[in-house]
Image (tube, helix red, strand yellow):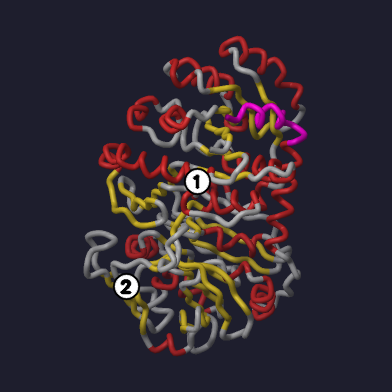
Amino acid sequence: MARAIMLQGTGSDVGKTVLVAGLCRAAKKRGLKVRPFKPQNMSNNAAVADIPGDNNHGGGEIGRAQWLQAIACGVPPSVHMNPVLLKPQTDVGAQVIVQGKVFGEARARDYQALKGRLMDAVLESWGKVGEGADLVIVEGAGSPAEINLRSRDIANMGFATRADVPVVLVGDIDRGGVIASVAGTHLILPEEDRRMIVGYLINKFRGDVSLFDDGIKAIEKFTDWRCFGVVPWLKAAPRLPSEDSVVLERLASGEARALKVAVPMLGRIANFDDLDPLKAEPQVEVVFVPPGKKLPADAGLVVIPGSKSTIGDLLKFRENGWDRDLAAHRKRGGHVVGICGGFQMLGRMVRDPDGIEGSVTEAEGLGLLDVETVMEPEKTVRNVTARSVPFDLPLEGYEIHLGRTTGPDTRRPSAIINGAEDGAISADGKVIGTYMHGLFGADGFRGKFLESLGIKGGGLDYRAEVERALDEVAAELETHLDCDAIFSLAR
């Protein structure tokens, strides 16, 4: 088994995902065969990964973070890098994905009882990820300080103690109270868990790092843990795909640019990293619009993203009045793109006869495309190569969706995916729907699409930008952390 080290946080959203990606890239640059691992993840931003040994399956789902971390390692993503993925569908329930495949659905309370059965899958995947590797860097979920969940934990200390993986604790100074959060974690952990922690690091520091010297001394007094370093605010981090929708609460409109793209923040928004390549374009401003706010009238393009609950989000879309905003946008001649669930919403009707998404079995769509969608039990999960029909340019992405969409506008497909027609385009060409995630990541297509909106594409190589951002994060970590010590403590 490969040596391993694990990063756990004093809370959620302390920056573990980017830190693990940066450490993976740093280890790769040292010539190590490194792999990422996250026992349990909760996110509707999923990626499609290979299922080793399953040649008849299109692919399996993992968290977007482990897809990014695999890129940082320079290896293809595998479902074993994230064996348990929870995809929230309601405030109290989620779809459970195990080793890439749908395992079932569970309410939060029921899932706690289910965890014990999932540990076997976690440990099986753990063994597979380590095969042929020199180092595995593990990311925890939430916080080990959630001792009320400890008895059935598979994401933090429950995993670390079973797999005997040493832990580095991550504290987020940007949110405040970092001394108390680190010292408090030490205080409330049982001894079995506390002895797994080999030290800590502080993340997201702004300003003169030396100002925290006394803070390090205070933490050492309370915990006797060593500090591996203080990481400044990583300027390259926003250029990496975001995993968790919690970041949407912090996304705001940037400086005014030639094209404003409005994106409604659906309650069960999924795969919103589809917008990242547009955000990276120098002439494009992407604005995520929260519930209660109008879609901006000066937007040239509205993108309706994916959803884990199409009918539920469609009903909320109308409650927010976004349907009226969208109709006004179209009347002004504005363009619309719907991706996956967003594509389904653009049609006349969405039907769910089997109640797959919940008790509401049908909803009137937004009516911008002459199509209808019927939800079906079998989920399509696959990486795809495709070609844009209107621009005759190559595309590359993935599909994760339920449902079959038919209707007159599908006779004008937006893409040819694996030889089959996909999506629909309105008669005037200004409304486009597709099941394909990742289409904006195709540089040639993105440039031509922007040109069709009157914007000159910047010739950006988006994938190269992600690689450069990973290199920059790794360089910052090498500067501000004792990476030698962290890697040497792996076992």
Q: Is residue 486 magenta?
A: yes
Give percent across and percent down for residue 435: 46, 72
Q: Is residue 341 visible?
A: no
Query: Horizontal and vertical percent for residue 279?
Result: 65, 60
- The answer to which of 117 and 318 lies nearer the viewer is 117
Mark 1–mark 2 contact, CB under 8 Å? no
The part of the image, by quadrant, that contains residue 454 is bottom right
> For residue 316, what is the image quadrant?
bottom left
**Residue at the image point whose x is 72% and y is 30% from the top:** 484
Tell me the number on the disc at residue 263.
none
Where 71 sits versus 186, above or below? Answer: below
Disc 1: which residue: 246
- In the rendered structure, which segment of residues is drawn in magenta? 478-491
Quick check: is 166 in the magenta stretch?
no
Q: Secondary structure at mark 2?
A: strand
398 up-or-down from 475: above or below: below
Q: Residues within 10 Å of mark 1 (few under 14, many from 20)?
A: few
Residue situated in front as seen by the camera: 396 or 127: 127
Judged from the image, the secondary structure of the residue bearing numbered disc 1 is helix
**Image coords of residue 308 (percent x, y):** 39, 59
Q: CA distance from mark 1 to mark 2?
A: 28 Å
**Which residue is disc 2 drawn over?**
350
x and y percentages locating residue 196 in the rendered image: 51, 22
For mark 2, does the 10 Å Cα neighbourhood hold few (<14), some (14 to 19), or many (20 or more) residues?
A: many
